[in-house]
Image (cartoon, rainbow, N blue to C red):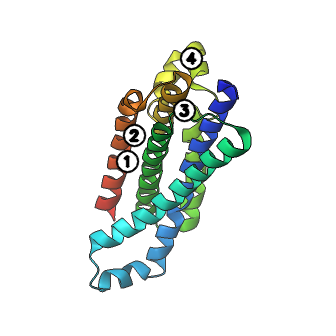
Amino acid sequence: MSSSSGRKVWQQLLLFVFLTSLTASAALIQTRQLGLARRMVATPTSVGTILIGESLGRLAVALLQGVFIMIGTLVLFGVDWGQPLGAVIIVVTFALVGSGAAMLMGSLFSNDQQASGVAVMLGLGLAALGGCMIPLVVFEVFAPTLWRVAHITPHAWALEAFDALIVDDGTVIDILPFVAILLGYAVVFYGLATWRL
């Protein structure tokens, strides 16, 4: 499979993992609306344990989707994901970013319908800006300023990591700078969500 076809798969993986994660924020809001959060806090379970459980649930959904897309496209279409360990590291890190963003959205909104609408708009908007709909190389050649702006999104950094791993035939060492930036996004999202919740 050509690298341009493969790139489309990487772009779609990131788009769907992030979008699905954001839309899952509605479940966190429903937990609060239905009073389940109050009941959980009333048990001997610590607030930290409850937050970790909520986070792990969202992370599991994002990881399941990412791994399913990777294995499905590898088996059915022969998509080259580069060095397997590197590809898994990128997907796990991006799933952390997506689940952190979901936790943050779930903490900011009080209405699940409102959060779902914003999640779709934000998920698609960030994916488009981050290079999931138009390759970053097009931005770099024709709109260098837009290419720089695209890097405010985690999507652009994850795509750069996939390019370094697959297109440039890199190793885990080559993707570490991009992974570190993605981990920074995850830490900020989870930190803000924890503070807010």
- Compute the Cα span from label 1 to label 2: 6 Å
Up/down of 120 relative to 170, above or below: below
> What label sits on residue 182 in the rendered view?
2
- Tell me which numbered mark, 2 or 3, is placed earlier along the sequence: 3
- Per the image, the residue denoted by label 3 is 82
| Amino acid type, callout 2 | Leu
Quarter residue 44 falls in? bottom left
Q: Nearer the viewer, residue 142 or 82?
A: 82
In the picture, the quarter occupied by the N terminus is top right
Can I make out residue 19 in this image?
no
Query: Are the residues tagged 1 and 2 within 8 Å (C-beta)?
Result: yes
Q: Nearer the viewer, residue 135 or 120?
A: 135
Q: Residue 40 location, x and y as percent?
A: 36, 81
Q: Residue 130 location, x and y as percent?
A: 54, 33
Give the number of the mark in front: 4 or 2.
2
- Per the image, the residue denoted by label 4 is 143
Is 96 on the left-hand or right-hand side of 131?
Answer: left
- Compute the Cα span from label 3 to label 1: 24 Å
- Per the image, the residue denoted by label 1 is 186
